Amino acid sequence: MVVLLGAIGVGVTSVFAPLLARLGNAGTAGIVLVSALGLALGVAGLSFLGLGAAAYALLWPLDPLIVYAWAAPLAAGGIVRFLHVSEPHRSGIWRMMLMVNRYGPVIRGTAPAEWFWRAAGLLGGLAPLAAVVAAGQGLGLTDRAALTAAAVLVAVQAAWTDVRFLLIPDRYTRLVLLAGLALLRCGIVVVATGPVGAACAKLWSGGPTGVAGGLILAAWASVPWLLLNVTARLGRTLPAPVVVTATLIRLPLTSGFAAVAVAALHSRPGLAAAALLLAAAETATLAAGRGRTFPMAVSYRAAVSFLTDDPDRARTLAGKWLRDSILNRPARPDLNLIRALAKRAALASRGDSTGDPAHRTGLDALCWTDLADRLLDLVDGEVSPRYPVKHRARLALAVGNARADVSWSRAIVLTRAASLDQACGQWRDCATRRMILGHPAHELLAHTMIAILLVRLGRTADAARSVERLQRTGTTTPVLRACVALAAAALAGGPTLAPPPVSARALRSAWRGEPGGRLRSNWTPEESALVLAGQAADLHAVSAAEVSR
């Protein structure tokens, strides 16, 4: 295998040797570019090319500086990948026995040093600001102020993106994304420093610059995102070629990072103002929701990975999740995956199977809540006994909130699938869990659903007792009073029953003051409002049909 990989490396080096020689003779910028390319290839897992470069240098004359600038970064990239990216499947039998003795047969090892790539990504986000500072007196006062403001906006976007990535539950996926983003930022800065950046600056200065050019760039970057966002909000889909084209159009201008780096490293009249307007527009779209759904989409893909026909793969994924998200975070256990599964089930129950190749909808959506319960059972059985004693109460509270969210999601699925008897029992479970957690507003809505379902099941006496209990609560919150009125109207019947005046915003406001806000899901108000409206519409249709008969 070593001989084969070395031969491949020699072949690749022989093909790229003339290009490497030209870049190396171009000066410092060329050497830096060769080194950055070698580092990137090493991190990507192609460090064996360094072996080929060394063998090539022994057989054919090549500038030693180019060899070092190409082979050494390849080796360094391979070391970085070995330490910070690759999964630790390299441990021996004795280490594996020690790990099993300490963590049990389920919990698995993890990829270390997430902080390394987070720090690299944040430092890469500060690179344009460093370029502005390094340019110093080479920039005019106005250009320096504009570029400083633009670089600060780019750094804010980098920090914002870093925080959003923390919502991705699968830590290994998060690690790879952070590493890729950090290397991309560093690579853009390296390329912008050399002749490619100078050529881009010259080409850019030949077009519209200044305020007019900035507005054109801002529109070029923002309009495709607005098109995709508005289409998604309207519940419609665009053809795949349109989506791909819109994404590629705005890709070079994303966050304004490359534009600010080029404008700072190669000063031209009008570039600073244009870069500032582009960075401001990208910051505004980020605040408006650009990229907000990306962590959840990645969470869905991670969830689908658990539902595999290979039990060993599912067990490995679960073991890594237990170690990464809970055992390694004793002060703040991360149960975002459970919340993503609960939301996935609620969305699938109304036909939204985005990200699921099997398109599980209706009662089939219960597979997501069953998976969430199995994972929480593993937390109780495998992690809790090994958790630090001083943090066990915090873990129990987080698991309790997660189980309440899963129970809520299962109740929504059963209600939408018209399994009324099972749904009624599940809403009782929701009410009990919310009462234990101290969530009276959630508990009242669960009792409202119980009363409505009892009416639909024809159990009028039980429904009357449930409505009487709701009326005794004496709630003063308008949206909760509307829930009580809806339950009473369902019991009274009649064709005048209208959908309840219950909105997701009102429910979110009513639930905001309850304890454990960070531990609860953020999807429940929307789905709960939709379920209430659906039940009211069904009751209205039944009442109208009875009157017509």
Image (cartoon, grey):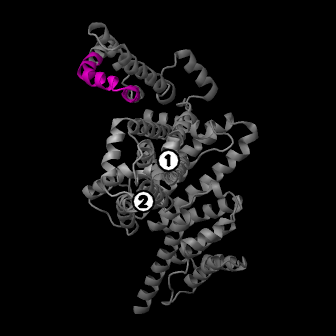
Q: Is any part of residue 191 visible from this angle? A: yes
Residue 160, compared with residue 103, is above or below; it is: below
> Could you give the CA–CA distance between mark 1 and mark 2, rounded to whole angstroms?
14 Å
Query: Residue 53: x and y, percent?
Result: 33, 16
Residue at 57% from the left image edge and 81% from the top image edge: 486
**Mark 1 or mark 2, whichever is nearer to me:** 2
Return the residue at label 1: 371
Q: Which residues are magenta?
A: 9-38
Return the residue at label 2: 348
Residue at 60% from the left image edge and 53% from the top image edge: 403
Badge 1 element: helix
Residue at 26% from the left image edge and 10% from the top image edge: 60
Circle 2: residue type = Ala
Badge 2 element: helix
Pick the residue in front: 471 or 67. Answer: 67
Q: Quadrant of the N terminus?
A: top left
Q: Tell me, yes or no, whether the highlighted magenta stretch contains residue 12.
A: yes
Circle 1: residue type = Leu
| Quadrant position of residue 198 | top left
Q: Quadrant of the C terminus?
A: bottom left
Q: Earlier in the sequence, mark 1 or mark 2?
A: 2
Determine the residue located farthest toward the right in the rendered image: 390
Residue 123, compared with residue 494, is above or below; it is: above
What is the chief secondary structure element of the magenta stretch?
helix
Query: Residue 58: x and y, percent?
Result: 31, 7
Pick the residue in front: 239 or 501. Answer: 239
